[in-house]
Image: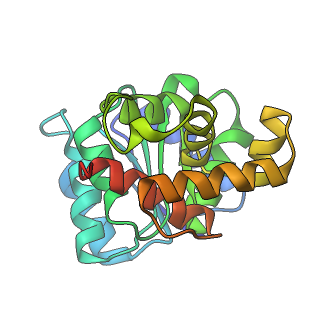
Amino acid sequence: MRVVLAEDLFLLRDGLVRMLEAYDFEIAAAVESGPELSRALAELEPDVAVVDVRLPPSHTDEGLQCALQARRDRPGLPVLVLSQHVEQLYARELLADGTGGVGYLLKDRVFDAEQFIDAVRRVAAGGTAMDPQVIQQLLSRRSVGDQPLGRLTPRELEVLELMAQGRSNAAIAAQLVVTERAIAKHTSNIFTKLGLEVSDDDNRRVLAVLAYLDQGHR
């Protein structure tokens, strides 16, 4: 699996390269700036991009902007974002097109190699890997009194948040200590209340929900 990695801090970039190689990933490129990232994504066509949000020369949101442009040029390009902060506007844009794997991890909440490698693999396979704090901030932008989110029960909101993390019905059931059948019922109710077509595809249903909320339907 070929990876393009963008991280401006040498020690962190080198550590990520060594970690990925230890788990049999091929590093197609490891870059430190926005222009280098844009060229690498355009020319190398990797299986997945692992991108820091803030890269030179602007040190603002250059990495995420490059990733978004790359997905416009190559729809469905899997992108895993690493950041110290939640950039809500661009995180929503990344999620909203509903194609390809996406992930958004907060650097200080990645606690071991297996957690990170699992996220890279899941995104590369077309799934999602979202830090719960990212999901909370994306969902909290809309008040629970707003429609249609306000139609959901507290339990349905809890299930929605776990869905948005990329969890399957079985995983949600295990965490909430209920039956998988109960979660299937909650999931069906969520899609009905949000006016969304039910799908058994975890990634597609998560992206559909987040895109729906992002676009401000009421």
Q: Position of residue 74 (x, y in %)?
A: 31, 77
- In this view, the residue in front, 101 or 186, is 186
Can residue 168 be seen here? Answer: no
Q: Is residue 20 positioned above or below 134 on the image?
A: below
Q: Is residue 152 positioned above or below 108 on the image?
A: below
- In this view, the residue in front, 99 or 72, is 99
Q: Residue furthest top?
A: 108
Q: Position of residue 211 (x, y in %)?
A: 35, 56
- Classify the position of the N terminus by image quarter: bottom right
Q: Position of residue 89 (x, y in %)?
A: 23, 41
Q: Position of residue 132 (x, y in %)?
A: 55, 32
Residue at 45% from the left image edge and 69% from the top image edge: 100
- In this view, the residue in front, 118 or 204, is 204
Label total for image: 0
Q: Is residue 2 positioned above or below 111 on the image?
A: below
Residue at 46% from the left image edge and 36% from the top image edge: 135
Left or right: 192 in relation to 116: left
Can residue 113 be seen here? Answer: yes
Judging from the image, the colouring scheme is rainbow
Q: Quadrant of residue 62?
A: top left
Q: Quadrant of residue 71?
A: bottom left
Q: Residue furthest left?
A: 58
Residue at 66% from the left image edge and 26% from the top image edge: 111
Left or right: 12 in relation to 116: left
Residue at 70% from the left image edge and 31% from the top image edge: 112
Left or right: 199 in relation to 4: right
